[in-house]
Amino acid sequence: MEKKFLNQGFRWYGPEDSVSLDYIKQAGAESVFTSLHHIPYGELWTKEEILKRKKIIEDAGLTWSAVESVPVSEQIKTRTGDFQRHIDNYKATLENLRLCDIDLVIYNFMPVLDWIRTDLNYTLSDGSTCLRFDPAQFAAFEIYMLKRAGAEADYDAETLSRAKSFYESLSAEKLLEFERTIIDVFPGCKLGLGLDDIRKMLNAYSEIDTDKLREHLKLFLQEVVPVAEKFGVRLAIHPDDPPFPVLGLARIASRIEDFRKILSYCDSPSNSIAFCTGSLSASAHNDLPKMLEELKEKIYVVHLRSTQREKDGSFIEAGHIEGSVPMYEIVKKLLEIQKERLEKGGSRIIFRPDHGRLLADDLEKPQLANPGYSYIGRMKGLAELRGLQFGILNSSCK
């Protein structure tokens, strides 16, 4: 692929992923985003383990362009228990990655749960399925299943009424399935958490408000960013998903104001943003083109997908060039940023098509271990985004 195109990546969950590296290469990707999911959160990534994974990728004719992610443990986020050992392991892991010629690491600082959806197989009019978030369904989970104290106060009367109706419509089997949908979608691994585990995790945040969580992120960055900068590693924080409060917890990477604060904690080229159009677009508050313009000097890696917001606060994951995201404008701006960067001797921006609808033959396959990461849906998204770039770069109106 010519240098003027963005670097085309694809998420891969390792040797156990049902989507093989051969398939990823056939889709037209140049590189992969992956992680050592078998290593527990907070533990050290050795050079041996990193090189073992890197060799598998390179033997397939691809490159390991981005680590997604080196997870930040709950102990680090709450600064409890083994948090200092976990931070020390994080710093040593960054050094080991750079010694293996890997220099881009994505992470997030979302409390308790990673990304949250209430339906992993929402059926669309054409028969394909996608991920969906419905606040009434999430209210049902919080109020009737998790039984979080004070959860009712976070919702209006209409949403509470819908939540009650939804909960009462579920059979015992569907209740269990719904519970797993909410709490067992950690990327690349199944932690086997139950409702009591989530309650214990929430208790750890009982004294942690927005300001305190921001302070914990600041302290973490002030320790790890100097190490990242020393070894030439770029750390990129992923936005909260969804980008609004859930479970009564603070959200500190959801709006432009949040990212201004995060970047102010450490003035370093190693302190950057993973610009995820899908996560950010779930809130009407976010003007993505304006955010991209303001943050452009701190964006090296991008997740491209879209959402379609609904009036009741629900959203579905739309097609990659559909929905609420002005994808033409975003991709055009990314190409302009990259052109300027390359002219100054910089590197290409790396992107991947994030999440994908379940369609065609994938609909007949067993339940995905990693919802949203079907092959055909993401291949379609990558092709659309590649075509969009081709059109922009070759248009007489560019």
Image: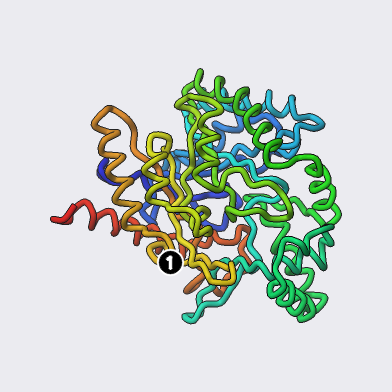
Q: Residue 218's quadrant in the figure?
A: top right
Residue 375: where, in percent of width, then height?
48, 61
Q: Is residue 151 left or right of residue 341?
A: right
The residue that appears at 71% across and 57% down in the rendered structure is 184
Q: Residue 294's quadrant in the figure?
A: top left
Nearer to the camera, 349 or 373: 349
Q: What residue does disc 1 label?
A: 323
The residue that appears at 78% across and 60% down in the rendered structure is 151
Secondary structure type for disc 1: loop
Residue 83: where, in percent of width, then height?
75, 29
Nearer to the camera, 44 or 159: 159
- Outermost residue on the top side: it is 230
Q: Is residue 265 above or below residue 137?
A: above
Amino acid type of the residue that numbered disc 1 sits on in the rendered structure: Gly
Q: Is residue 307 above or below residue 171?
A: above
Q: Is residue 116 above or below residue 302?
A: below
Q: Is residue 299 left or right of residue 271?
A: left
Residue 92: where, in percent of width, then height?
62, 23
Disc 1 crowd rating (10 Å Cα; few below 14, some 14-19, many 20+) is some
